[in-house]
């Protein structure tokens, strides 16, 4: 990676990556773009929670890759997609993430203000317990 990781100057910076088993569905209008029961919940210090979905659970036929790259000092360089009929980026991925967040490799995140990211229940659902 060409640029140095932000962890060099701030080794205490937190990006927590947690595997979950909730059903997550991503929609553009009434069309399902992605659906998974093995999302990653990424909780980055100074940012909101972002859900990442395995590439194999994304319907890339509804997306078009665009020539738009952004850089996060704590995750690396991100490549982006737009909806096939749209122009604005709706999703991104880190193809070579920094070692501290290597778990996000092979996962795609979606802009929550451009598509709907729905979090459902886990299967089996967590229910009360008996004493």
Image (cartoon, grey):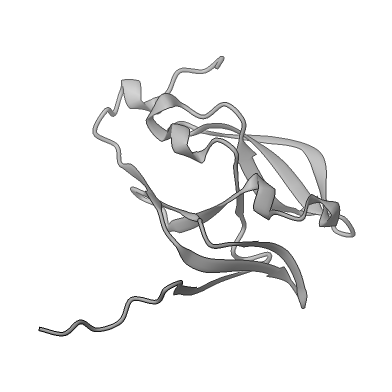
Question: Residue 126 vs residue 27: left or right?
Answer: left
* Front residue (pair 36, 84): 36
Q: Quadrant of residue 115?
A: bottom right
**Which image quarter is the C terminus in?**
bottom left
Q: 119 left or right of 128?
A: right
51 sits to left or right of 91: left
Residue 60 screen position, x and y as percent: 79, 50
Position above or below: 107 against 77: below
Q: Position of residue 3 (x, y in %)?
A: 52, 18
Q: Residue at x 83, y 57 (%)?
A: 62
x and y, in percent, of residue 88 in the image: 77, 54
The residue closer to the viewer here, 38 or 9, is 38
Q: Is residue 42 left or right of residue 131?
A: right
Q: Residue at x 42, y 73 (%)?
A: 124
Above or below 124: residue 98: above
Is residue 107 or residue 65 the one in the foreground?
107
């Amino acid at each position: 990676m060409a640029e140095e990781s932000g962890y060099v100057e701030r080794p205490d910076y937190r990006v927590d990556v947690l595997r979950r088993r909730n059903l997550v569905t991503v929609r553009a209008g009434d069309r399902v773009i992605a659906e998974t029961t093995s999302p990653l919940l990424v909780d980055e210090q100074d940012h909101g929670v972002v859900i990442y979905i395995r590439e194999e659970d994304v319907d890339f036929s509804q997306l078009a890759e665009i020539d738009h790259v952004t850089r996060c000092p704590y995750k690396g360089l991100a490549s982006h997609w737009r909806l096939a009929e749209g122009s604005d980026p709706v999703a991104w991925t880190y193809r070579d993430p920094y070692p501290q967040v290597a778990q996000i490799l092979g996962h795609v995140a979606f802009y929550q203000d451009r598509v709907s990211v729905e979090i459902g229940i886990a299967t089996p659902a967590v229910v009360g317990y008996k004493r």
